[in-house]
């Protein structure tokens, strides 16, 4: 069973701080990694994705990938109350093993940004 | 922008009824997916389709079937609804076999089976 693990939280950070969200995955053949944000009662919306080792920045968000450690993270700089949501990590497998069309989701980390 | 539209935001049905959930996407995506989301269990894949009339079972297909007669439309069918199928149902679509293509979600249908 291919797994994606996230700490469920809640992770509480003060406004303006850096929030660090972490995700580990079990399938070493995984190719792409996605972060989704989900507000309560709403559907997941894509924040960003990464597929190469290292960092990828988009505005206040930075995704970090370490394939050797099977670890992906999302950093949110200058956290705002509007960032309070559940963040889902999703992993796309290897096309050659039939996993290329599907995403495996973690159960999400709840982030609370406090005033 | 990708638009994935689910036919109902809220739906209440009775045990034993046959229930249809509809999903339409407007981006000519090859792949379409149905998930259910329950507290503490996350998103679980029910069925997916990578082409018209093609379907594959996901992780929890029991009690469900799907239909994809047109590329833009993917229907989830609960053959005989049961109370344990009360859940949030999410439809998603993605482009082809390209490995870095994300899935885009509809707004979800909150289904209650009484």
Image: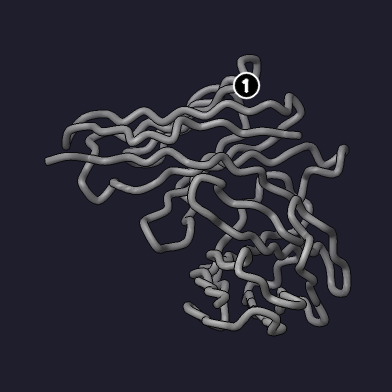
Disc 1 is placed on an element classified as loop
- Residue B83 position, x and y percent, is 60, 69
Image vertical order of residue A87 relative to residue A54, above or below = below
Image vertical order of residue A69 relative to residue B63, above or below = above
Residue located 69% across and 41% down the image: A92
Question: Which one is nearer the viewer's eye here, A19 or B63?
Answer: B63
Residue located 82% across and 42% down the image: A95
* Farthest left residue in view: A115
- Residue A104 position, x and y percent, is 66, 43
* Numbered marks: total: 1
The C terminus of chain B, quarter of image: bottom right
Answer with the quarter of the image where residue B16 lies: bottom right
Answer with the quarter of the image where residue B74 lies: bottom right
* Farthest top residue in view: A68
- Left or right side of A1 for B88: left
- Residue B49 position, x and y percent, is 79, 64
Question: Which one is nearer the viewer's eye here, A36 or A114?
Answer: A114
- Left or right side of A60 for B51: right
Answer with the quarter of the image where residue A5 lies: top right
């Amino acid at each position: 069973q291919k797994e994606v693990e996230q700490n469920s939280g809640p992770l509480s950070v003060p406004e303006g701080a850096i929030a660090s969200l972490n995700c580990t995955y079990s399938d070493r053949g995984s190719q792409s990694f996605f972060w989704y944000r989900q507000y309560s009662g709403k559907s997941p919306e894509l924040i960003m994705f990464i597929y190469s080792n290292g960092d990828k920045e988009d505005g206040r968000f930075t995704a970090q990938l370490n394939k050797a450690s099977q670890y992906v993270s999302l950093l949110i700089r200058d956290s705002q109350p509007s960032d309070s949501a559940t963040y889902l990590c999703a992993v796309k497998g290897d096309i050659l093993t039939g996993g290329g069309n599907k995403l495996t989701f973690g159960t999400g980390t709840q982030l609370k940004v406090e005033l | 922008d990708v638009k994935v539209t689910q036919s109902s935001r809220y739906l209440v049905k009775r045990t034993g009824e046959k229930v249809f959930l509809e999903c339409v996407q407007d981006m000519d995506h090859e792949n379409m997916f149905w998930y259910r989301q329950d507290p503490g269990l996350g998103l679980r894949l029910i069925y997916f389709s990578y082409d018209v009339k093609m379907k594959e079972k996901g992780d929890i297909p029991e009690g469900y079937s799907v239909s994809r007669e047109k590329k833009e439309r993917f229907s989830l069918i609960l053959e005989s609804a049961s109370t344990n199928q009360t859940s949030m149902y999410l439809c998603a679509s993605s482009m082809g076999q390209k490995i870095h293509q994300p899935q885009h979600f509809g707004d979800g249908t909150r289904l209650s089976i009484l």
